[in-house]
């Protein structure tokens, strides 16, 4: 009788231990999954931020020295610069919004301003993202060559809903 009773107690204890382990895993596992998704979401956001900044920098540099992007052919003026930004940022054009301008006109010594809004791939909707999930990048650079000579002072695509170009001034 004592042997059967010991087995019953051991079985009950092992069932309790398995139940406790399952409960602990459920509590800790949910938190661990949330942390992992947060790391992924913000990692993708920061990657998109770096891509946008690099694309804007390369576009501005190519534009002020009078070169076109290889992927944009011979598209002239502001359209060519906008096309170059989209190629350099390496995003689908539907996810990239471009604002390029030379407020004082296109002439050597004046400033070229290139701004871009990119929808981040990291916006899973699990955590709140800065700027509603849009990455912003802008750069001003001095114009060095008159070769491109776009007319007017610039062009801007319509900003997506909830966004504006006010930060680009």
Image (cartoon, helix red, strand yellow):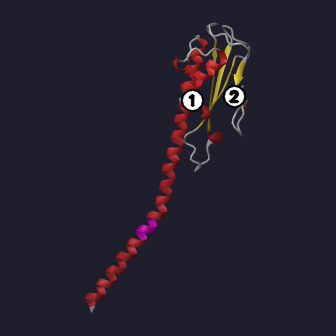
x%, y% of residue 2? 27, 90
**What residue would you read off at disc 1?**
52
Instruction: State the residue at coordinates (47%, 55%).
Output: 32
| In this view, 2 is above or below 77 | below
Q: Residue 49 sits in which quadrant?
A: top right
**What residue would you read off at disc 2?**
157
Of callouts 1 and 2, the N-terminal one: 1
x%, y% of residue 92? 57, 32
Q: Which residues are magenta?
A: 20-24
The N terminus lies in quadrant: bottom left
Other residues around mark 2 within 10 Å, as few (<14) / some (14–19) / many (≥20): few
| In this view, 165 is above or below 63 | below
Q: Is residue 23 magenta?
A: yes
Q: Residue 150 sits in which quadrant?
A: top right
Label 1 sits on a secondary structure element that is helix
x%, y% of residue 64? 61, 13
| In this view, 154 is above or below 49 | above
């Amino acid at each position: 009788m004592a042997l059967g009773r010991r087995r019953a107690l051991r079985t009950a204890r092992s069932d309790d231990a398995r139940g406790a382990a399952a409960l602990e895993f459920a509590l800790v596992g949910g938190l661990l999954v949330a942390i992992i998704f947060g790391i992924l979401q913000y990692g993708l956001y920061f990657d998109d931020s770096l891509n946008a900044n690099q694309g804007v920098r390369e576009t501005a540099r190519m534009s002020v020295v009078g070169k076109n992007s290889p992927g944009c052919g011979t598209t002239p003026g502001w359209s060519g610069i906008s096309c170059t930004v989209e190629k350099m940022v390496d995003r689908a054009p539907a996810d990239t919004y471009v604002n390029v301008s030379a407020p004082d006109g296109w002439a050597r010594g004046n400033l070229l301003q290139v701004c871009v809004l990119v929808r981040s791939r990291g916006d899973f909707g699990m955590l709140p993202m800065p700027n509603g999930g849009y990455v912003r990048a802008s750069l001003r650079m001095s114009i060095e060559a008159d070769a491109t000579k776009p007319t007017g002072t610039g062009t801007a695509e319509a900003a997506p809903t909830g966004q504006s170009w006010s930060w680009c001034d």
